[in-house]
Image: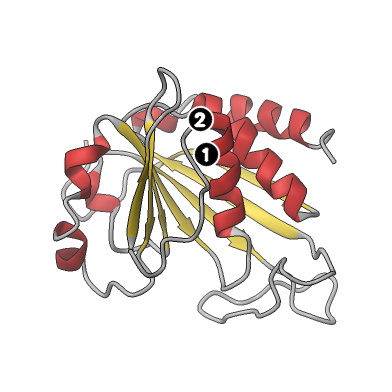
């Protein structure tokens, strides 16, 4: 049992290379079946890393009403399910500066019945659930094939241009929910690599 403010030990740790935007979306589609109501995903990465692209894939895999776009200006958007699955709550916490501002969104009211994905949520939303999936997308430094962007620095570019640049997706599950998920995530990615 963890105390408030203390992170539970990681139950899942995976590092996945993602070469293109299409594969990032495919990863989201393949992760979606393992998600269930009450799941919280904390999504971090520099501007243009592919956070919203991953959420689009999750939305497709959950079969929710779309389109899934960045909720930067509305902060939170609910995508109802088209079938019997959970809704997707997509939050952009970029402009939020404290957990108190997150409380004002009443995300915990929807959390039990939805899959909640929070872009830029690190350090702000972890108290909403006893466990969560940390997803960090790392971009290569332009011109340096093997170097990664140091934490806290922004890499520009993104996948909006003509060039696809590979990303590394780091998954860290926190809490009991994610203790046994490692093998499933690796299987999900193995099948996603076959999709163009």
Q: Residue at x 71, y 69 (%)?
A: 160
Q: Position of residue 4 (x, y in %)?
A: 16, 50
Work out which quarter of the rendered image holds the C terminus and state it.
top right
Q: Are marks 1 and 2 in contact (CB under 8 Å)?
A: yes
Q: Residue at x 52, y 29 (%)?
A: 63
Q: Is residue 37 above or below residue 139?
A: above
Q: Is residue 154 above or below residue 167?
A: below
Q: Position of residue 51 (x, y in %)?
A: 56, 58
Decide if residue 190 is in sight here: yes
Q: Is residue 178 left or right of residue 3?
A: right
Counting every numbered tag in the picture gives: 2
Q: Position of residue 187 (x, y in %)?
A: 69, 26
Measure how far apart labels 1 and 2 are at the Cα level: 5 Å
Q: Residue at x 72, y 66 (%)?
A: 159
Q: Is residue 59 left or right of residue 28?
A: left
Q: Is residue 34 left or right of residue 24?
A: left
| Of residues 66 and 88, the one drawn nearer to the viewer in this rendering | 66
Q: Is residue 175 above or below residue 18?
A: above
Quadrant of the image occupied by residue 47 = bottom right
Disc 1 is placed on an element classified as helix
Quadrant of the image occupied by residue 161 = bottom right
Circle number at residue 142: none
Residue identified by numbered label 1: 59
At label 1, counting other C-alpha atoms closer than 10 Å, the crowd grade (few under 14, some 14-19, many 20 or more) is many
Q: Is residue 114 above or below residue 74?
A: above
| Of residues 89 and 16, the one drawn nearer to the viewer in this rendering | 89
| Of residues 172 and 38, the one drawn nearer to the viewer in this rendering | 38
Residue pushed farthest top? 84
Work out which quarter of the rendered image holds the N terminus and state it.
top left
Q: Is residue 97 left or right of residue 137?
A: left
Q: Residue at x 29, y 52 (%)?
A: 126
Residue identified by numbered label 2: 62
């Amino acid at each position: 049992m963890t105390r408030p403010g203390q992170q539970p030990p990681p139950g899942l740790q995976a590092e996945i290379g993602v070469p293109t935007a299409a594969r990032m979306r495919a990863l989201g589609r393949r992760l979606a079946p393992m998600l269930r109501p009450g799941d919280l995903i904390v999504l971090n990465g520099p501007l243009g890393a592919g956070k919203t692209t991953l959420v689009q894939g999750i939305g497709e895999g959950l079969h929710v009403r779309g389109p899934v776009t960045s909720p930067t200006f509305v902060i939170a958007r609910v995508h109802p399910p088209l079938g019997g699955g959970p809704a997707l709550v997509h939050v952009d916490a970029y402009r939020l500066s404290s957990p108190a501002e997150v409380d004002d969104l009443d995300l915990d009211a929807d959390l039990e019945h939805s899959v909640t994905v929070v872009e830029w949520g690190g350090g702000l939303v972890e108290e909403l659930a006893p466990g969560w999936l940390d997803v960090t997308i790392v971009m290569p430094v332009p011109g340096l094939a093997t170097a990664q962007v140091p934490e806290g620095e922004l890499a520009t570019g993104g996948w909006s241009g003509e060039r696809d640049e590979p990303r590394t997706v780091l998954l860290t599950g926190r809490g009991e929910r994610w203790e046994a998920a490692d093998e499933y995530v690796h299987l999900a990615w193995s099948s996603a690599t076959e999709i163009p």
